[in-house]
């Protein structure tokens, strides 16, 4: 049989061609290797099917039947509802979809179908909501052992591709590639960890003989994902830790004067984290530390104390924020705190006027500016900070790892500054070890005393009048409100309220007479900045927005957050949105406004959010339910992604990989052993950008 390579162009696989290659590209598939790592999202157990008459509520079932009727209507909540009835010799099952009118084209009367999902009883009728389904193409297709009589893989698809065709393509590619695929894991490591070889694992994940074979395959492939990420980050961490850093001495009196002048004591967590940071600054090695803390935990104050520790020894510091508004807010706050200490603070953003920019650049180059605050503008090539000792990056996940790496340049020749990156996006430890393995971790897990919890509750569509009345009352008292939607504009086939049209409706209707503004990601940067600044200054009382407000706005007067379609957001993202309110002394509220029917699991997730205010608890729950990409909230440039691994569920793999990676690097730091050559090739192929970011 013909053998192909991992990097074989998918277009030239038998039966693909240029048209289907373009469709595969939409799924991120360019090579044969990409195709084999396009893993099933689930498997249908077609070793048996259930009769409709035997179905019971709560059962995960697969049934084979014939389409009887199909049609659509609007639900009571205003969303479109599609219903298909399917029958067999024992009864009738109803299938329902919300907002997916295109499915009706596939369910014509008389069509044979296979359906899988959880059975419910509604109004006395058996139904499955949003089932997995497959249109059966006749007896020949049913007889194909790839599609029936086994655990059958169900793949993510795109327009122009079908399950049968993709299943066959992956099977035939496995036949050609799996027998000779290069296994990156050394044989002794595979044996020590009880992991099967790569070829059998690829067969086992796509076409498992049984559930045990599938689980063993998933474990091996998840191990590889975690292991390679940790290896790439550990190599970067090792290179950095070997670098000489600025050795800073005991503090003078700036830090003491700041702390003594605060109207509140530092929390125990802040003091513990400061101890970790100061040990790094005194060590003579370059600090690369991630500081995590929930919204309002006092990370910025910790960063300022670290900056003052550096400044009082004749060095400069820089703080980089993800948005211009947040940079200016940080700049104003830090300037107020530092002025009594005689510390010079300036702010630099992309919209700083030319004359002011020249003055800031000159002051920075002359060493007259102690602390420079800004956006990514502060790491442009024309910014000179000759005595740079500390770079602080706020909301670090908003910057790609390459941008984060650029903050390491500057300062004394050959001696990079210390780096402190901060994030209010809660990342559970197991995930942080995997995604941020090049950084040491510090956690502020304590909120300052006296913070009032934000009242959070679900509100049905008929209760929105109460919400709008509350917004009016808060506005009359000088306070402000956010109203958040998941999309900017309405699109065909997507039954979601959109920011643009709802802004117009609210401003002319329920919130008429209030100063209402609009903010979303398609606005030009200057327009976004104007909207955020107008809201912060009180010129706008209500800001209708998408999740662009998730970070970058600190408005103490904002006391109301309304989130429409909350089921479309992860718990961690909802927590970030809720964190935009409750930042002042006034009581704050967050309303979740779902539309129409929601599955029980979704309702329970939203109820958990309503009763939980700990961001790390919510992040761990998100990680269990949705996967690591949704916890982080963004796919940053150069960041690793996981197809199968879930670092919370696979916590034992995370710890095992960390142990094995440390042992491997200690024994062969350059991966020069011939036995490690396949590992080095896989590392360069999958995570070359992580390694490049160390110098990028």
Image (cartoon, grey):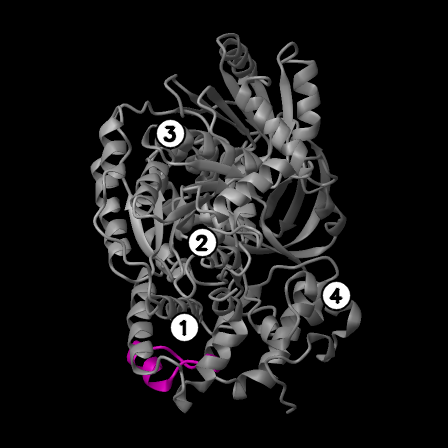
The residue closer to the viewer here, 627 or 315, is: 315
Instruction: Look at mark 3 in the image and give the residue it sits on.
Output: 339
| Pointer 1 local density, CA inside 10 Å: few below 14, some 14–19, many at least 20 | many
- Answer yes or no: is residue 27 visible: yes
Q: CA distance from mark 2 to mark 4?
A: 50 Å
Q: Which residue is mark 2?
A: 386
For this rendering, which residue is in front, 443 or 487? 443
Q: Is residue 349 visible?
A: no
Q: In what element is the residue under mark 2? A: loop
**Whether label 4 touches label 1, CB < 8 Å:** no
Element class at badge 4: helix
At 23% from the left and 38% from the top, the residue drawn is 253
Query: Which comes sooner in the sequence, label 3 or label 1?
Result: 1
Helix, strand or loop for disc 3: helix
Q: Which residues are magenta?
A: 184-199
Bin the neighbour count of mark 2 within 10 Å (Cα to Cα): few under 14, some 14-19, many 20 and up.
Answer: some
Q: Is residue 369 above or below residue 43?
A: above
Please tell me whether mark 1 sits on a helix, a strand or a loop.
helix
Of 52 and 681, the residue lying toward us: 681
- The front one of 2 and 92 is 2
Q: Kindly identify which residue carries mark 4.
A: 22
Give the distance between the C-alpha atoms of the residues marked 3 and 1, in whole angstroms: 57 Å
- Nearest to N terminus: mark 1 or mark 2: 1
Q: Is 633 displayed left or right of 664 in the figure?
A: right
């Amino acid at each position: 049989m013909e053998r192909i390579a991992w990097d074989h162009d998918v277009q030239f696989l038998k039966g693909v061609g240029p048209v289907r290659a373009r469709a595969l590209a939409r799924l991120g598939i360019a090579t044969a290797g990409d195709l084999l790592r396009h893993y099933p999202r689930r498997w249908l157990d077609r070793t048996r099917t259930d009769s409709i008459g035997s179905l019971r509520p709560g059962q995960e079932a697969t049934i084979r039947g014939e389409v009887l009727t199909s049609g659509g209507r609007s639900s009571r909540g205003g969303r479109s509802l599609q219903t298909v009835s399917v029958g067999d010799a024992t009864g009738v099952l109803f299938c329902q979809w919300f907002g997916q009118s295109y499915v009706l084209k596939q369910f014509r009367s008389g069509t044979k179908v296979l359906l899988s999902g959880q059975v419910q009883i509604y109004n006395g009728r058996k139904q499955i909501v949003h089932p997995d389904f497959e249109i059966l193409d006749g007896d020949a297709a049913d007889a194909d052992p790839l599609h029936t009589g086994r655990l059958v893989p169900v793949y993510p698809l795109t327009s122009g591709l079908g399950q049968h065709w993709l299943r066959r393509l992956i099977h035939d590619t496995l036949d050609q590639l799996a027998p000779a695929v290069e296994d990156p894991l050394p044989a002794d490591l595979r044996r020590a960890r009880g992991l099967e070889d790569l070829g059998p694992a690829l067969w086992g994940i796509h076409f498992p003989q049984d559930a045990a074979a599938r689980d063993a395959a998933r474990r091996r492939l998840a191990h590889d994902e975690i292991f390679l990420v940790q290896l790439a980050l550990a190599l970067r961490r090792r290179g950095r830790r070997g670098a000489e850093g600025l050795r800073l001495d005991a503090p003078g009196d700036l830090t003491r004067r700041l702390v003594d002048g605060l109207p509140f004591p530092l929390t125990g967590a802040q003091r513990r984290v400061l101890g970790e940071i100061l040990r790094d600054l005194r060590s003579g090695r370059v600090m690369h530390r991630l500081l995590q803390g929930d919204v309002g935990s006092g990370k910025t104050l910790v960063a300022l104390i670290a900056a003052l520790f550096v400044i009082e020894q004749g060095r400069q510091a820089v703080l980089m924020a993800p948005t211009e508004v947040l940079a200016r807010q940080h700049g104003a706050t830090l300037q107020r705190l530092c002025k009594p200490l005689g510390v010079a603070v300036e702010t630099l953003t992309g919209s700083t006027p030319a004359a002011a920019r020249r003055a800031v650049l000159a002051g920075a180059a002359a060493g007259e500016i102690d602390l420079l605050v800004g956006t990514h503008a502060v790491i442009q090539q024309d910014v000179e900070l000759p005595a740079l000792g500390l770079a602080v990056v706020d909301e670090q996940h908003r910057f790609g790892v390459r941008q984060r790496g650029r903050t390491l340049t500057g300062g004394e020749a050959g001696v990079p500054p210390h780096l402190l990156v901060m994030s209010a996006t809660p990342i559970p430890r197991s995930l942080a070890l995997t995604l941020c393995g090049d950084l040491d971790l510090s956690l502020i897990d304590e909120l300052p005393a006296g913070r009032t919890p934000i009242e959070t509750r679900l509100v049905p569509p008929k209760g929105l009048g109460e919400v709008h009345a509350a917004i009016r009352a808060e506005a009359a008292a000088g306070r402000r409100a956010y109203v958040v939607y998941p999309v900017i504009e309405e699109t065909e086939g997507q039954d979601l309220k959109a920011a643009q049209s709802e802004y117009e409706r609210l401003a002319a209707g329920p919130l008429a007479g209030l100063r209402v503004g609009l903010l979303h990601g398609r606005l030009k940067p200057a327009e976004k900045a104007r909207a955020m600044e107008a809201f912060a200054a009180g010129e706008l009382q209500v800001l209708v927005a998408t999740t662009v407000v998730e970070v970058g706005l600190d408005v103490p007067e904002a006391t109301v957050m309304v989130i429409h379609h909350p089921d479309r957001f992860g718990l961690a993202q909802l927590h970030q949105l809720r964190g935009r309110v409750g930042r002042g002394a006034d009581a704050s509220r967050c309303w979740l406004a779902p539309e129409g029917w929601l599955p029980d699991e979704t309702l329970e997730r939203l109820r958990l959010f309503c009763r939980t205010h700990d961001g790390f608890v919510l992040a761990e729950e998100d990680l269990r339910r949705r996967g690591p990409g949704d916890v982080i909230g963004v796919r940053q440039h150069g960041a690793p992604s996981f197809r199968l691994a879930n670092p919370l569920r696979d916590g034992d793999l995370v710890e095992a990989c960390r142990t094995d990676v440390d042992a491997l690097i200690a024994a062969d730091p350059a991966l020069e052993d011939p036995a490690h050559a396949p590992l080095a090739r896989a590392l360069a192929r999958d995570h070359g950008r992580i390694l490049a970011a160390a110098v990028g």
